[in-house]
Structure formats: C-alpha cells, structure tokens
Amino acid sequence: MRTYDYDFFVMGAGSGGTRAARVAAGHGARVGVAEDTYLGGTCVNVGCVPKKLLTYGAHFAEDFEDAAGYGWTVGDCHHSWARMVANKNIEIERLNGVYEQLIKSAGADIHWGRACLIDRHTVDVGGRRFTAEKILIAVGGWPFVPDFPGSEHAITSNDAFYLPELPKRVLIVGGGYIAVEFAGIFHGLGAKVIQLYRGALFLRGFDDDVRTFLAQEMIKKGIDLRFDAEVQSVTRKDNGTFLVDITNTGTIETDLVMYATGRKPNTADLGHDAAGVALDAHGAVVVDGDWRTNVDNIYAVGDVTNRIQLTPVAIQEGHALADALFHPSGKTVSYDYVPSAVFSNPEIGTVGYTEAEARARYDGVDIYRSTYRPMKYTMSGRDARGLMKLVVARDTQRVVGLHVVGPAAGEMTQGFAVAIKMGATKQDFDATIGIHPTAAEELVTMRTPVPNPEQRARS
Ligand code: NDP
C-alpha cells in the first residue's frame, strides 16, 4: 500500500476549503491546507464581509438625515474613508486569525504558498511537495475585466476595498451583485456615481419587478444609471482622472473606473493538465454530483466550479464532501431554493423562482405584490419605497418565489426561506399571524393576486 503525507490535501483556505479541512480533520483525517494569499478567501478578505461593513458605513448618511424627522439635531457630518478602511482592515485581520485558529485547532497543517498539482496525488506548494490520497481544489475565483483599450486603468472590487481615498466621481461597469452593491456604497459615502450596464436592465436573472423597482429607487437616490451602454475606451489624463468613451453617451470624465463584470475560476496555474483534471470552456473545474472531478481522487467545491457563487453554498459543499469522504452520513447539499441577498441600497432578498421562471415552469401562477413605504420614513420624510412579491404555483398553491426590496430584505428572506424550502403554501402564509408593525408582515397579509401580464396589459 502506498503511503501519503496526508489523507486529504486542500488547495485554498477560503470558505469551502476551510470548512472541508476542519470537518475532515475532525473525522480523524490527516489534513494539509495550502493558501497563498489570505485565510478566509474572497468572502472574508475582499467579498461578503468587507462589503457588508462598507455598506453599513455608507448607510449612516441616510440615517443621519432620517434622524432629523425624529427630533435629532445632527451637526456637520464628515466621513473619513481612510479611518473606515483602516478599521475594516483590523476586523479582517481578526477574522484571518480566527480562520487560522479554526484550521489549526482542528488539527490540520497550513502551508503558505501557491498550490499546484504535479500529478493526481502530489501538490507543490512554493517548492515543497506533499502527497495526498485525496485532493480538494477550492481555489475560488478572481474578478474578470474584459479586454478593451485602456482596460489596465480599470480597478475591480478587490482594489476598491483598499483605495487610499474616496474618489469624487466613480464609474461602475456591470449589472450584477457587485456593481449594484458598490454603486450604493460609493454613492452613500458621497461620491457621484454612474453605473453602466450593457443590457436594457441590470440584474439579469432576478425577478423583473425587482430589477425595475431597484433601478427606480436607485435613480431617486441620485445614482446615474445608464443602460444599453458600453465602454469603448478609457484614457488616463495627466491630472490622474480618466476620460471614458461610452456608446450612446459620448465621453465622460471620472476619477475611478471600476469593473464588476463577473468572476472567473482561479485555474490558470492550477496544474490541472499535469493531474489530468478537466476544465470546462470557462476554465471551471468540472465536477459530478459528489464534487468529484474526472480524476477520481480529486474533488472541487465552491467558486472554482463556477456553479452557484455564494459563500454558504461553498461551505455546505465543503462540509458535505468531508463528511462523505471521512464519515459518511448520507447528507448532501440541496441546490433548490437557495436564498440570496444583494446589499444594494435598497437591499434585495430573494428565494425561489422569478415570476418569468415560474410562468415557464408551472401551468398557472398567482402573483401577490405590494409596494410600501417603510414606516421609518413616514416621519423622516424620505422618498423611498419597498417591494414585496410572492410567486405561487396555482395548482398546489405552493409559494415558489419570494422577492423583497427594502430595508432588511436579506434578514427577512432568510427566515421565509426555511418555510419555502419546506414547501409552504399560500394558505400557510395566510394562516401565519403577522408581527405588527413590521414590513415583513406584508408577506403574510397579501390576499389578492395581481392580474396576470395579459390582463395587466389590457387594463
Ligand atoms: P455577476 O455575474 O453577478 O454580474 C456580472 C455583470 O457584468 C453582469 O451584469 C454582466 O452582464 C456584466 N458583464 C459580464 N461581462 C461583461 C463584459 N464583457 N462587458 C460588460 N459587462 C459585462 O458578477 P459580479 O461580479 O457582480 O459577482 C460575481 C458573483 O459573486 C455573483 O454572481 C454572485 O454569485 C457573487 N456575489 C454575491 C454577493 C451576495 O450574495 N450579496 C455579493 C457579491 C457577489 P450580463 O448580465 O449582460 O451578462
């Protein structure tokens, strides 16, 4: 029998890799982990965590304004970008330490350096070689910037978290999660923001009412949304600002060009060829339903597989894989009804099917929809509204989609996601007593379906 240095070697100490390493070590496996950048991966360092902290930071601007309606006199407010970033960095370092402790206390070894596959049982980490019976690829993804004249001037979300100062004018390109979230952050902190999207309406894949509603609310706040527009070139002026040539718009001048045009799997120098691991056309590691690659002792979880790019999904995958390999329990990961939130301003919470997806999937669909003025704004006078929407399969009356735009949409959606995952029907929602006064009670008190699109068009 061949002996290996490790039972399990994990490439990448992000969300999925760390969980897999800890759980495997907890089951008694000898585990090595390689990481070349930072413990905690994208989420902890340049993703969910710092993004949420900056979102909190940006929100104070509205909170100070709203306070006036409640009798507060708030003096001159000043924001220090540098102080916020420094404090954010302290928190991230604390979390890096927590991750280190979690891995080490589970009994796994951390090896610093870039991990590269040498063959199906050997990994090189900065010149040191380790053999392992089983290997997990959990190296995540990296922001992608398309090629265009001047693309070298564009920053990505990775850089945005470490800017030395807040730019006065920001151009954000892209129409996904990251683009709308950073539009809200920069705008809230006082920058003049233009967000550019190549299609007719951003957030492709989200419910159409949500997309339209968010666009309206962002415009009301003063964010300049430009759809059906693309950057042709970026030129840097001597004074450090940028001239951006945009289709349908002409040239604009800005202090920062940020691209949020998606993320690509981090497989460029993975050594997949040497080990015989297959990638798809987008460079993602191809896995089966058990996260196994075409090489039967090599597995992959999380963003490197380019499936659902969400931290909690990667964590569940890592956990389930480690269980399956070292302490089989039969548990697996369900990819149905995965909830998510977009921390735009206002926030989006969503779980299940959009109206369009449900209409394509079910014979009949009932839609319940309501817009509301968040109670907090009645006294503050803020001109902002929220949206609640339920998508119900008519024959079973199962609630198959829930979409919220407004304050705390993510918090709300997490709770409702349990009910929806369990198969709650509209009658279950109706039978649930609302909590008054909350915004969420609207989701259990909507009684009359809105007309279907044809009826809406006729009326
Ligand atoms: P997304 O894939 O969500 O969006 C990418 C955007 O860029 C789309 O609007 C896309 O347009 C556009 N785009 C792609 N290529 C080009 C191009 N060549 N030129 C112009 N525009 C282009 O990526 P993000 O970077 O926003 O986020 C990556 C992933 O990270 C998300 O999918 C999400 O899973 C995850 N994430 C989750 C968060 C959360 O849970 N709150 C927060 C942040 C990220 P089109 O639609 O036309 O293709």
Image (spheres, grey):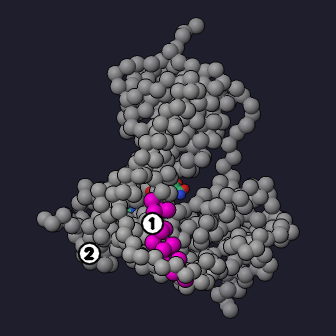
Q: Nearer the viewer, residue 162 or 353?
A: 162
Asked whether mark 2 and ligand 1 are closer than 8 Å, the reply comes as no
The vertical placement of 152 against 280, above or below, is below
Q: Which residues are magenta?
A: 54-69
What is the number of the mark on residue 58? Answer: 1
State the image coordinates of residue 23 (x, y, percent, origin top left): 62, 30
The vertical placement of 97 against 341, above or below, is above
What is the number of the mark on residue 252? Answer: 2
Whether residue 94 is in magenta: the answer is no
At 36% across and 57% down in the image, what residue appears? 83
The answer, for residue 229, to whether it is visible in the render is no
- Tell me the kind of residue under disc 2: Ile
Q: CA distance from mark 2 to mark 1?
A: 25 Å
Q: Nearer the viewer, residue 459 or 422?
A: 422
At 61% across and 84% down in the image, what residue appears? 378
Q: What secondary structure is the stretch in magenta mostly built from?
A: helix
Q: Quick one: label 1, few (<14), some, or many (20+) residues within 10 Å?
A: many
The answer, for residue 209, to whether it is visible in the render is yes
The vertical placement of 221 against 426, above or below, is below
Q: On the rendered structure, is 456 left or right of 195? A: right
State the image coordinates of residue 317 (x, y, percent, origin top left): 61, 40
Residue most extreme to the top: 1
Q: On the rendered structure, is 56 left or right of 224? A: right
Asked whether mark 1 and ligand 1 are closer than 8 Å, the reply comes as no
SS assignment at label 1? helix
SS assignment at label 2? strand
At 51% across and 72% down in the image, what residue appears? 63
Whether residue 63 is in magenta: the answer is yes
State the image coordinates of residue 284 (x, y, percent, origin top left): 48, 42
- Tell me the kind of residue under disc 1: Ala
Q: Quadrant of residue 403?
A: bottom right
